[in-house]
Image (tube, helix red, strand yellow):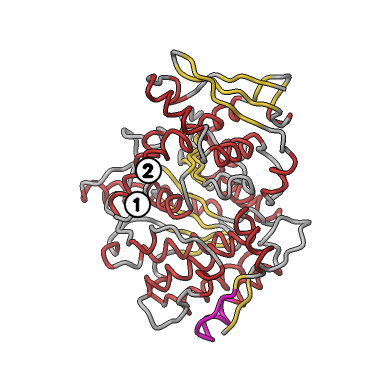
Amino acid sequence: MLIQLNPTGVLDLLSQLEVDLLEQSSASERYRLFRNCALAVLNVGSHTDESSDIYDKYQDFDIRLVSRERGIKIELINAPDTAFVDGEIITGIHEHIFSVIRDILFICQKYEKDLKEQKAITHMVFDMLRNADALKVNSEPSMVVCWGGHSISEVEYKYTKQVGYELGLRGLNICTGCGPGAMKGPMKGATIGHAKQRIKNNRYLGLTEPSIIAAEPPNPIVNELVILPDIEKRLEAFIRTAHAIIIFPGGAGTAEEFLYLLGILLHPENDKQCLPVILTGPKQSEAYFKELCHFIEMTLGVEALSKFEVIIDNPQLVAQKLKSTMANVRDYRKSQGDAYYFNWTLKIENDFQQPFIPSHEQMANLDLHLEQPKQLLAANLRRAFSGIVAGNVKEEGVKAIKQHGPYILSGEPSLMKAMDKLLQAYVDEGRMKLPGSKYVPCYTIKA
């Protein structure tokens, strides 16, 4: 089956030079990445976190760019039937397909060389968000970033929806990693809250990356999709666009995000930053947060605990607090001469920006000892959890584990014991893989 699609968004209007560049990109080594991301978008709603399942099932899928004098079209060959209704592609999926072209082919080719300088990396993140029209200039602070696991219990999922509903009633917008679970729940709840308040310009911003998009395809509610090149730039996009952050229960990926955030907030230059952070979940998740807070206190110290608040089983209070802090965020940004839509003044050190490739050697060489600056320890812990995420669900990481066995993590005995306890809790609670999948750890902890 062959389907042709007209462009949407920024690709509506292209010069002939831009069309030529797109054609060159689609014929280059980047094509496989482009094809896989497009296939992931077409598989919205799939219930698997094994990217290979999708790639194996649709081996005959292909996507091509067709050049025209006034722009481009794309051709989809043997695309998944679930992306269509009565032979017509679903509008949201249509838009997301062109988001893939925009970010993978059109923008990333501008940054082929390795980026080393902090300013250059931040500019790339800004450039991609701006090109996606994700930075709303004349708008008040309202973007709440929600982090949490793709594999959560039904009780936890309903709680994320209730929090989203309360946020939506108060006119707040949602940004998540765009996948299922705690990434979908807040958006789904907010749609009802927005509808009740007759809010028309509602935003459901999804930020993802090529290496995880197949394992966590964009959920159907995302109406703005941006695909950053790697996890580090994705995380920077989250916190520079955020006016507040909520962390729901999750697994290794949520711990990675939380450690990244704390490592940045602990930097002395960020001491006065106004970025509210709330950890929240239902009563059944209280033990989860106690375990996580204990790990943070043991590794990053009491100061790290002051950077966030924990609220258990009270969606309304979460939304009320965040709504009331939006004025503080606005006043702080105004006092610093900073933009409401992108937090330029936030200090992010190079350790949090440079891509970490979780090879077995890199994972084994991580400095996991307590006697180092807290910010550096947070960066190294973030890398450790990032590697575990890769070994769990990312295509290259899963392949590496199958070929070479589990990653070996070693370091200071007390730290490794605490990490092992935290990770084992995630395993026991089914937070590492979707229900129905037997989890075999991709790591081994050694003191």
Per the model, the C-alpha gap separating discs 2 and 1 is 8 Å
Q: Is residue 214 above or below residue 270?
A: above
Residue drawn at the location 67% of the way across and 55% of the way down? 151
Dot 1 lies on which element?
Answer: loop
The single residue placed furthest to the top in the displayed view is 69
Q: Which residue has dot 1 on it?
A: 115
Q: How many marks?
A: 2
Residue drawn at the location 72% of the way across and 34% of the way down? 60
Residue 18 disc label: none
Check contact, mark 2 vs mark 1: CB within 8 A: yes
Label 2 crowding class (10 Å Cα cut-off): few <14, some 14-19, many 20+? Answer: few
Q: Amino acid at mark 1?
A: Leu
Label 1 crowding class (10 Å Cα cut-off): few <14, some 14-19, many 20+? Answer: some
Q: Which residues are magenta?
A: 408-419
Q: Is residue 80 above or below residue 143?
A: above
**Can see residue 168?**
no
Q: Amino acid at mark 2?
A: Tyr
Dot 2 lies on which element?
Answer: helix
Q: Which residue has dot 2 on it?
A: 111
Residue drawn at the location 31% of the way across and 66% of the way down? 267
* Front-most of residues 307 and 414: 414
Q: Is residue 325 above or below residue 310?
A: above
Residue drawn at the location 60% of the way across and 51% of the way down? 182
* Front-most of residues 323 and 339: 339
**Can see residue 107?**
yes
Q: Position of residue 95 (x, y in %)?
A: 54, 28
